[in-house]
Image (cartoon, helix red, strand yellow):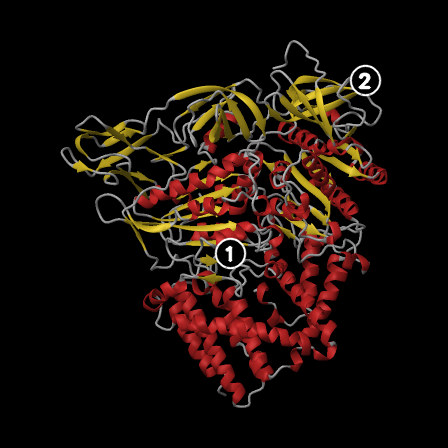
Amino acid sequence: MAQAVETRGIIYGVSGPAVVAKGLKGARMHTICYVGGRGLLGEVIRIEDEFATIQVYEDTTGLRLGEEVVSYSEPLMVTLGPGLLSGVFDGIQRPLKRVRELSGIFITKGLKLDSLEKERVWQFTPLKERGDTVRAGDVLGTVPEGHITHRIMVPPYMEEGVIGDIAGGEVRADEPVCTLEDGRTMGLYQRWPARKRRPFRDALPPSEPFVTGQRVFDTLFPVAEGGVAILPGGFGTGKTITEHTIARFSVSDIVIYIGCGERGNEITEVLRDFPQLKDPVTGHPLSERTVIVVNTSNMPVAAREASVFTGVTIAEYFRDMGYRVSLMADSISRWAEALREISSRLEEMPGEEGYPPYLATRLGTFFERAGKVRCLGDGERTGSVTTIGAVSPPGGDFSEPVTQAAMRFTGALWALDTELAYRRHFPAVNWHKSYSLYYYQLRRWLEEGVAPDMPELREELMTILQKEAELVEVVQIVGTEGLHDEDRLTLEIADVIKEAFLRQNVFNPKDVFATYTKQYWMLKAIFAYKRSATESLKAGGYLEKILSHPVRTKLMDMRNIDNEEIEKEGRSLVEEIEGAFTQ
Amino acid sequence: MIEPITRYYRTVKDVTGPLIFVTGLRKASFGEMCTIRLADQEERLGQILKLEGELAIIEVLEGTSGIDSETTTVVPKGDIARVGVSREMLGRVFDGVGKPRDGLPPVIPDRYIDINGLPMNPASREKPDYFIQTGISAIDGLNTLVRGQKLPIFSCAGLPANELALQVVRQARISEKEERFCVILGAMGITSREAFFFMESLAESVAQERTIAFINLAGEPTTERLFTPRIALTVAEYLAFEHDYQVMVLLTDMTAYCEALREIAGARDEIPGRRSYPGYMYTDLATLYERAGRVRDRAGSVTIMPILTMPEDDITHPVPDLTGYITEGQIVLSRTLHNKGIYPPIDVLPSLSRLMNLGIGRGRTREDHRKIADQLYASYARGCEVRRIVSIVGMEGLTELDRKYLFFADEFERRFVGQGEKERAIGETLELGLALLKILPETELVRLR
């Protein structure tokens, strides 16, 4: 990247995270500055003649009028390379584990640290040799990082060239590994502006589901690989727990977890548990595939605003290697609030509820970086970024601006419901309010990849839940006793669906991840029960007797069947149910 | 850092609400404290809220009455807001900005600490998994409290939130068995009656030498309220992380704190957010609540129990709403239960402890704790639903099973929640829960399996 040019000015005004500098002539929009004697990092967000407004990524208390401001002509950058995995970074990519070594319990101001450790030595295996022509995105070689193969790629900004020298073996992270004939060099690292989308060859349409292992999502409201889902819900509805669960169990190569304006204690859980937990597919520690970007609610707001862009840039980088990346953003609302806070300090004209009018546009630049792509470079690589964003609407009211704006960019809405959460029905997904626009694109995959009747079962399930909603209204007026037996049976089936299928216990190791096959067989058994019970009722059987039949208990216990056993066990349960009411 | 020369400014331009606008302060810093001297030599404290070239906006802590643009003098102190901390503070009572209120001389500080603190590094935090037995079934059994948690009480006007908080503190004290246990009270805008009540009860239940109180009364300046919780938490962090204390911080009433925040925002002509509270209230509250925690390699902890009154009993009001989004759960009190004579009137359905799972289970409480809690929740929720139906269709419309649920819900409220003043060990709580569940047929107890 271009060599940084310096301009100097002085502090003229301070209001929270917004600092006005005077005399910063030639400063460029969205480039970084160091503010004050301690050199707090900031970004230029407005220029008015010789005054530049800077959003500062650290607490500005104590900044004095007249202190120096130095501006560089470089935007906010993210350092990409080996060492990212199992790392913990703040919103502007400072490595928090090393910050801890330097400053103890608390984060002191003005710390300047390399995001990735320069001194670390990596084992580099070249895939190219002298004389090869390389272009942007080509894989120069690989570095093993845990069980993940970290592909060292030619940076997207590098123009074509011929390799003059490339060396394998032990390499220090900041040393060049490849020199082109024209003298340009490449190392293990590349840097990329956080707010700029990384290039790729083609965008691909959604065709496969992103498997979360959570029945209510995968069966009812699937999100496509490369898609975007949002999880809005009032407090206590389980947004964070859902994000954690997906981070742990979803079928992904790499997980980027952004804790944006949320709780410190929750991140501790991720930090402490992930090294012990195993990736369900590979069996390796979860931390090896995870990068955490965390800017808790009490850390500076401007860095919170930057954190989602830092996170998505890291996600795109792994996507470019050809990996399936999932990006958890918890929470989008806190990001939007940071945006609002800075906007109000700038005294900009507010839009709805005080959010700036460009809220939706800015949100779009984040969400639209999700997707499935054909990567740049040699070899046919496809990679994807699937984004799951939590939204925290004030008072649990979805009509507020952030939820509404986020809904425009998402294909799946997983609406969390306070009533369900009060009953401890988790995941507390309201099946009437949620939707997935990907479902119709994924139907084909479900027919081929799971079973030809999978879509049918899903639609039948939706019908029963719809019917139940109508019946519940009737019950409110006449009581359960006043219903016809068929209707009471429908309520019963809906109950089984909710208890046995939709509710999923993340603390039960057998239940926490259900493969599509398990989900399918659970549905098969539930509908076998429905058919047999209906027939028995028609033939004159007593409802009470049908309801108290022990097969019901077996349906409830299906969650405890291993994913590997389900086909066999499920088949025999279906047979048992079919014969259950005939005597 | 302190300027060698003290400068005096008589350049007050405007006075509005709790704010004064002063021009020409040299080398002023953001957040700097100032002394404001009135014509009659009365001194007040102020803090710089905004700097804009020549102009500084200063918030006056003790209010602006009597300030003029002719004779009032502003003296910048050259430093940000700090509190002098020391272990000698134990047993003392201070006002909202840390001046002694008990007639004793000021404490000689060990050192001065920035009251805003610094954000705790998430990578330094220790997992909060140490169970605190409060002796209250609705909390221990269903919404377990752990060390380093922030768990607020959402109350309604007229409900015994303070009594409950003090009971928690008293009983936790016994279960902690720790020599180094202390309680810090940060009281914002409470009445003199409440202040008496707190001071008496704390002395009785925890012993005076284990408490520190910072009290800002309802009649005292609102601006001071913004300092009170920060000072209390700074002292808490100091005792916890430098002297290994298990510190319980009671903050009451957070609604009064938020109103003070709104008042200042209004005076600054800021763009109001929901119900006129400032848009940054979430961040502001977070900088308080997030100071709870445990850290690696240190024995101490800061546990915060904020108390707030929900205006009009409305849980979606910005104060409880934003608090609930930051804290690790909430204990919600219910007027209906209170009117039924149930104490503590904890409405368990909207109550929650997010850290519960870390604190319970084998080796902490009991292996079946989670299952019992889940089943109690689900069955009680169903019982409450039946209760709603009964009010429309009467008992005749109910099935046999519905009636059992109804009975269960009543018994649960009466016996499990309504335990009165007496204390229950966790084992007793869980056994009682299991006994109550026997009201229902076994096939219904899906979550116990």
Q: Is residue B34 left or right of residue A363?
A: right
Pointer 2: what residue? B39
- On screen, B172 above or below B335? above
Q: Position of residue A45 (x, y in %)?
A: 48, 32
Q: Position of residue A295 (x, y in %)?
A: 51, 38
Callout 2 touching callout 1 (CB < 8 Å) = no
Q: Residue furthest left?
A: A131
Three-letter code, disc 2: Ala
> Front-most of B364 and B314?
B314
Indicate the quadrant where residue B113 lies. Answer: top right
Q: Residue furthest top?
A: B5
Q: Position of residue A172 (x, y in %)?
A: 30, 28
Q: Is residue A363 left or right of residue B357?
A: left
In this rendering, does residue B190 appear at all?
yes
- On screen, A495 above or below B28? below
> Front-most of A8 and A93?
A8
Which quadrant holds the N terminus of chain B?
Answer: top right
For mark 1, give the secondary structure. Answer: loop
Q: CA gap, disc 2 to disc 1? A: 67 Å
Pointer 1: what residue? A506
Mark 1 neighbour density, 10 Å: few (under 14) some (14–19) many (20 or more):
some
Q: Tell me the chain of label 2.
A: B
Q: Disc number at residue B374?
A: none
| Residue found at x 29% / y 33% | A188
Which quadrant holds the C terminus of chain B?
Answer: bottom right
Indicate the quadrant where residue B103 lies. Answer: top right
- On screen, B171 above or below A583? above
Q: Tell me the chain of label 1.
A: A
